[in-house]
Image (cartoon, rainbow, N blue to C red):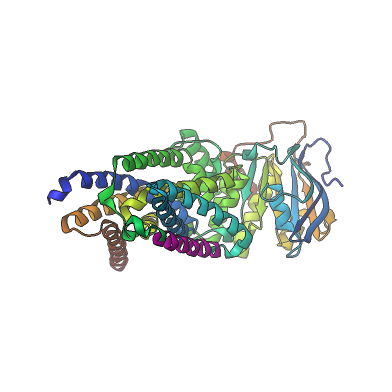
Amino acid sequence: MSIGTADCHRDVITVDSVSFSYQQKNVLSNVSFNVKERDFIGLIGTNGAGKTTMLRMIVGLLKPTSGEIRIFGEPISQFKEWNRIGYVPQKNALNPLFPATVKEVVLSGLVGKRKWFGAHSREDYNKCDDALMAMGVEDLADKRIGQLSGGQQQRVFLARALINNPSLLILDEPTVGIDHETQESFFHMIKHMHQHHNMTFLMVSHDMEMIKGYLGEQPASTAGKLNFYIRHSHETQDCVEQNLAHSLKHLRAQMASAKEGK
Amino acid sequence: MDIIFSGFFQRALLGGVMIGITAPLIGIFLVLRRLSMIGDTLSHAAIAGVALGFVIGDFPIIFGLLFSLLASFAIEKLRKSYKSYAELSLAIIMSGSIALASIFFTLGRDLSMDANSFLFGFIYTLTATDLWAMFAVTVAVLIIVGRHLHGLFLITFDEEAASVSGLPVSYYNVMISVLTALVISISIKIVGGLLVSALLTIPAACSLLLARSFKQSIITVVIVGELAVIAGLLIAGVWNLAAGGTIVLVLIAMLLLILLGRNIVSRVA
């Protein structure tokens, strides 16, 4: 079963007849789906449907009992380019007393490179500033992460995920515990990125309103109790054009002008 | 006062300066990952090891290290079986270690070994070999933590994001356990097996009250650790008190002062 619509786009995630069981209970059985470049996939399911399990398998935290998962065409066990994936965790994982500034959290997105005792290069700091600017949280850079509101924290985590300019952004229930207004501006930001950047999205959510509003009323496919809602961002860009990604620096300016234009 | 210029005291001071860096530096990662009790458990395992080392011959440090390493692997294994009841694994290993230690102590009665010295420290017997062992562990801890500071930060702050970034999380967990076991087994001669976890956790407790950033908290734990070890050893030397106990009381006094100072500041502000 192929979910993507455009053939000119490469496969980003391939899940091939994957099953997962935990303590003799089948959580997922024989799930297959395919995420293509520039898809926005909403993964919806009731509690216990296995959506978090699915996500954890895709990012390599769990191993499927059977079947295979490939990322950017490579089997997950051999996949090395983890800096191409941005990951936004569930908000409630954060300990409010943790001694870390917003800047330190965002810079931790660059962890793949080795450095001595916290030394970052000028380039790293520039990337960090760009990511903070793009999310509109540059004023909070030196605040302790636990002092921020839920919506601000979510922007910081999004900035961390974006600092590497990822090709695939994975969001795990990003708006749990955030008020409605903040949720809306968060989704606005995500939608904009999907339409104007060369980025593929996989989001686990139970916010049906947002999902249906952007991805359509009916799931494009189902596997067991998991529903996949899909929107492919193809119409605004030409596939042959390679230079789809523009730097984070311009993201906020573009979003501002897009808002004014409405 | 003369005691301060004696050879054994200077050796103790030198050793103290080294564990004053390493123990708090490892401790901050344990505390932030909510593993404060692991230090306590591993140090009890080390006591059992030290006791066995004396029963067999004169290898206390080696067996102490071996036992705390074994205990750290056992904890990881048990943690996986009990999942969300992970503390249970600490309780089991801790009581098991004390049981073993008590048996080894009675076995070694003929060897006229002094149980107090394992439990509360025995700085008067610090040898040149001990100092070299401490130096080696200190250098290793500084190199490894310095090299992996960003990875350690991410794994401490957000373990899931760390795995998604491609960090070998289980390798890091083993690394932290091994470093903890190493630090405990070199610290046991100075602060004693029962008190070693104070040197791991109390500097971190102080830094949680003071530091705004991760960088600050790393600097704070090392300063607090050094001040407490040096002041504690000097006080113990001059007034002839137990060194380990004095160091720990100085640590607690510092924590209380910080709490008090913070209260005053928040009232004035």
Image coordinates for residue B145, horizontal then vertical, percent: 44, 42
What residue do we see at 53% from left, 36% from top?
Answer: A113
Work out which residue is located at the far right of the displayed protein and give it.
Answer: A1
Q: Is residue B94 magenta?
A: yes
What residue do we see at 78% from left, 36% from top?
Answer: A10
Is A233 placed left or right of A162 in the picture?
A: right
Image coordinates for residue A44, horizontal then vertical, percent: 75, 59
Say if residue B192 shows up in the picture: no
Quarter of the image where one finds residue B139: top left
Q: Does the magenta stretch include residue A224?
A: no
From the viewer's side, name the closer residue of A125 and A72: A72
Image coordinates for residue B213, horizontal then vertical, percent: 41, 51
What residue do we see at 77% from left, 51% from top?
Answer: A65
Work out which residue is located at the far front of the displayed protein and give it.
Answer: B110
From the viewer's side, name the closer residue of B30 and B8: B8
Quarter of the image where one finds residue B196: bottom left
Image coordinates for residue B263, horizontal then vertical, percent: 31, 67
Quarter of the image where one finds residue A252: top right
Whether residue B187 is situated above or below residue A163 in the rendered picture: below
From the viewer's side, name the closer residue of B219 and B58: B58
Mark count: 0
Q: Is the magenta stretch mostly helix, strand or loop?
A: helix
From the viewer's side, name the closer residue of B264 and B238: B238
Whether residue B158 is situated above or below residue A45 in the rendered picture: above
Magenta range is: B88-106
